[in-house]
Image (tube, rainbow, N blue to C red):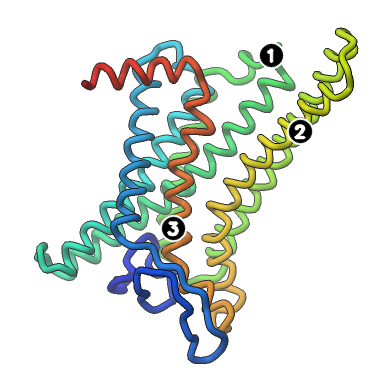
Amino acid sequence: MSMQGPQRRLLGSFNCSPPATPHLRLAANQTGPRCLEVSVPDGLFLSLGLVSVVENVLVVAAIAKNRNLHSPMYYFICCLAVSDLLVSVSNVLETAVMLLLEAGALATQAAAVQQLDDVTDVLICGAMVSSLCFLGAIAVDRYISIFYALRYHSIVTLPRACWAISAIWVVSVLSSTLVIAYYDHAAVLLCLVGFFVAMLVLMAVLYVHMLARACQHARGIARLQKRQRPAHQGFGLKGAATLTILLGIFFLCWGPFFLHLSLMVLCPQHPICGCVFKNFNLFLTLIICNSIVDPLIYAFRSQELRKTLQEVVLCSW
């Protein structure tokens, strides 16, 4: 992949917009409408990346430390943290190296920079694919734990979980290599977009079904205890709000990036699509934000993990 100066972050060849200044402005498109362009300062991007790195390192350390957390569910959460960690580390590393090169503080050959860019892009793309896969795996795991509770430990065994985790990592590495090698082929971009849509639909169907079962269970309890109807309505509203937040964050953080890829196939030369392309770095920042939010949704809500996390932090001091 070719280096493109300031447009240096993550899958630079997917970005067909010119360099932007680090603030919010209306950019005049030469062939069409004025575009709202939101550029992310390098300092903010690096800071968000470092916050994500710290959060996900703590999640991995806590799960590794506590043997009570050595179960398939927490292994999936740990792998999600590793994926998010790789996304953040790769972006921070690539951005830092490019800033040093631009400042003249780092001298290296163009071929070495090109190799670093290719390796980093494969790593970032693979981490993104694995992150989406593990989000789907966590949803499937929770679905089985609710609808097949009595058989859960015979269905989701540790060996099966390890095989699933290994398969996800292998597929992620292979697919990312193909994506970076053939990024200029429309079929490759469409496959990536289709994969995102499939994960979104899978998570939506599973979590909606789980919410419906939870509401049904709440109605049963209400009948047994002869509670008032508003109590059940409150539970349903709380569950719906939680589901909306979970899927909303997923779509908000990942959707713009895959919209960018879709438009590259559908209308690469259209002026309006060009306005979307100008915000490519913003879309990458949203993915970093997702790496920050994931531990809050999937890991830190566990009391056992929070307790272990406190021990890890206290021991580090």
Residue 171 appears in the picture as rendered = no
Position in image of residue 80 (x %, y %):
46, 36
Seen at 43% across and 70% down, the residue is 24
Residue 147 appears in the picture as rendered = yes
Report the front residue among 308 and 111.
308
Q: Is the Cβ of the residue at disc 3 closer than 8 Å to that at disc 1?
A: no
Image quarter in which the C terminus is found = top left
Distance from Cα at disc 3 to Cα at disc 1: 40 Å
Disc 1: which residue: 151
Image quarter in which the N terminus is found = bottom left
Disc 2: which residue: 237
Seen at 45% across and 62% down, the residue is 282
Distance from Cα at disc 2 to Cα at disc 3: 32 Å
Disc 3: which residue: 284
Q: What's the amino acid at mark 2?
A: Leu
Position in image of residue 214 (x %, y %):
76, 24
Q: Earlier in the sequence, mark 3 or mark 1?
A: 1
